[in-house]
Image: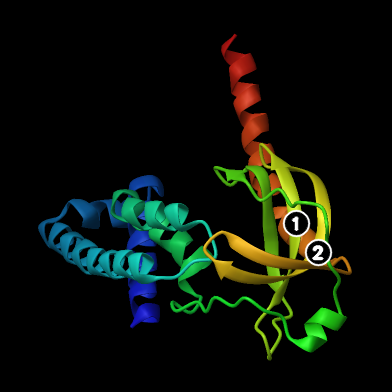
Amino acid sequence: MKPTFFVIVLVNFLYFTLTLFGHITVLEDWHISTVGRTCNLALFAVALVGMIFFIVDAFRRKYEGSRPWAIALVLLGPFSFGLCTLIYCAAFGWRAREFEYRDHFCDACLRASFEYQSPLDLTTLNQVNGGRFVGRSERCPDCGSTIRTHCFYLFGIPLYSSGSFRVQCVAMDHYLARKCDFYWPHLAKIAVLPAICVPLIVLAAYYTVRQK
């Protein structure tokens, strides 16, 4: 059912985006016709059912963190023609709903990592400022721990990393972490946020200068 609702919400978003901003004559004529308006309402009604499905999914889901962001995204879904719902699906919805909290590492993970004495800054503000874990790789089949990489951001720009860790989520926003070798593939995920934020900052600065 989840893939079906995802496809319906996606079709609804693409259709309304192309209709409103694509300047496609055929779609514009269809959109204002009597049959077209009826079909538009029917499509949005079905998509709205899908968005409500994901709202229920978000409230029932267990999280490692970022629960307020997930809830905010699905609640904004109907007001964005489904765009925020699609972002929720990409970030959270594809994972298993019943996340299992664990408070121990298996012997193999203990041998492959070591204690980290310094405190980790995992205080994140708006997901673009502060420290957080990035990535989730090489899940252990025995204890379920994963390799995650710490990174501290300022306005979406990565400033420093304390390295990679074997991580167990004990409860939402509470972790057990043991240091391991740096997991280089996570550099690509660390670069995602600045790839989004830097162009926005440059555009904002450009338009500010132009207005002056």
Q: Is residue 80 left or right of residue 156?
A: left
Q: Residues within 10 Å of mark 1 (few under 14, many from 20)?
A: many
- Tags 1 and 2 touching, CB below 8 Å: yes
What residue did someone put label 2 on?
Answer: 164
**Residue 187 horizontal/vertical position (percent):** 80, 59
x 15%, y 55%: residue? 33
**Residue 188 horizontal/vertical position (percent):** 77, 60
Q: Is residue 6 left or right of residue 201?
A: left
Image quadrant holding the C terminus, namely top right
Name of the residue lying farthest toward the bottom: 142
Q: Toward the viewer: 29 or 78?
A: 78
Under mark 2, the amino acid is: Ser
**Residue 174 horizontal/vertical position (percent):** 59, 61
x 83%, y 57%: residue? 117
Q: CA distance from mark 1 to mark 2?
A: 6 Å
Is label 1 in a helix, a strand or a loop? strand
In the depicted structure, whether residue 113 falls above or below residue 74: below
In the depicted structure, whether residue 13 falls above or below residue 143: above
Q: Toward the viewer: 160 or 44?
A: 160
Q: Toward the viewer: 25 or 119?
A: 119
Q: Toward the viewer: 136 or 50?
A: 136
x 65%, y 23%: residue? 206
**Disc on the earlier residue, 1 or 2:** 1
What residue did someone put label 1 on?
Answer: 150
Residue 122 visible to an observer of this rendering: yes
Instruction: Find residue 173 and name its label.
Output: none
